Amino acid sequence: VPVQWPSAFEPDMLTCGPHGSVAALTASGLGALIPSVAESKVASEFTLEGLIELGMARSATWSNTSLMIVTASGKIASCPSPRTGLDKSTCTPLEVPALPWFLLDETAVASAAELDDGRLRAVVGTGGRVALYELREGASDETPTWHEAGFVLVPSNDKATTVTATRNRLLVTVEDGTAYLWNLRRDGAPASTKPTRTEAPVAGG
């Protein structure tokens, strides 16, 4: 779909929201919003403030009423959902630990999302291994910790380039554009070791 983006805008990531809306973001927090690709093809600009202190944005997931941003430090920030007429939003770092392994591998990819029941789920891909994490509360005087609920190995050991998970699905794409889908159990673990579905890009004719 042809879209009129702001001048000189070069996004690093896209995320889909409710009602067909799409937001594009740069790593520094500049963004452009299309409220609905079916109704408007002109993007409006917005800015996410408060990310620089945490590091550049590495991924964005539109969860319920907020954007969940994974930053280069492994910390997660919650930002108000972009909407037409709102040109600035202030992001707030979540009081949770940095994502496991994320700081140890500069090539790692990750995402985080708030589920419908309020639980926080994260995915970290290092090479061909993609792990799913659930945040578990400790005792009243303890900091919550990330618990690995399970992991999958990408077929042919291809490197994961994007990873995202919802309540019951894990989606992984690799360098050649192939997408792999796994079903997830309620505890966040994969229902099987093999992908439920595989979609390969169609070569142009």
Image (cartoon, rainbow, N blue to C red):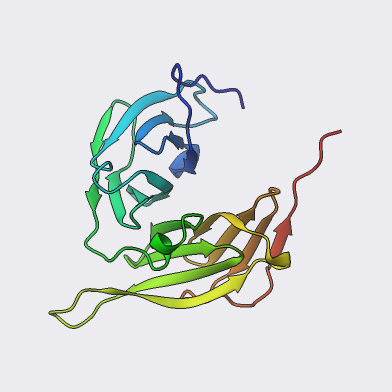
Quarter-of-image position of residue 122: bottom left
Residue positioned 25% across, 31% down in the render = 88
Residue most extreme to the bottom:
139
Residue positioned 20% across, 74% down in the render = 143
The one of 189 and 39 positioned closer to us in this rendering? 189
Residue positioned 45% across, 16% down in the render = 7
Residue most extreme to the left:
141
Residue 203 horizontal/vertical position (percent):
81, 40
- Residue 94 position (above or below residue 148): above
- Residue 134 position (above or below residue 94): below
Residue most extreme to the top:
7
The one of 104 and 77 positioned closer to us in this rendering? 104
The answer to whether 171 appears left or right of 110 in the picture is right
Residue 127 appears in the figure: yes
Locate the N terminus and report the quarter of the image it occupies: top right
Residue 187 appears in the figure: no
The one of 141 and 62 positioned closer to us in this rendering? 141
Residue 117 horizontal/vertical position (percent):
34, 67
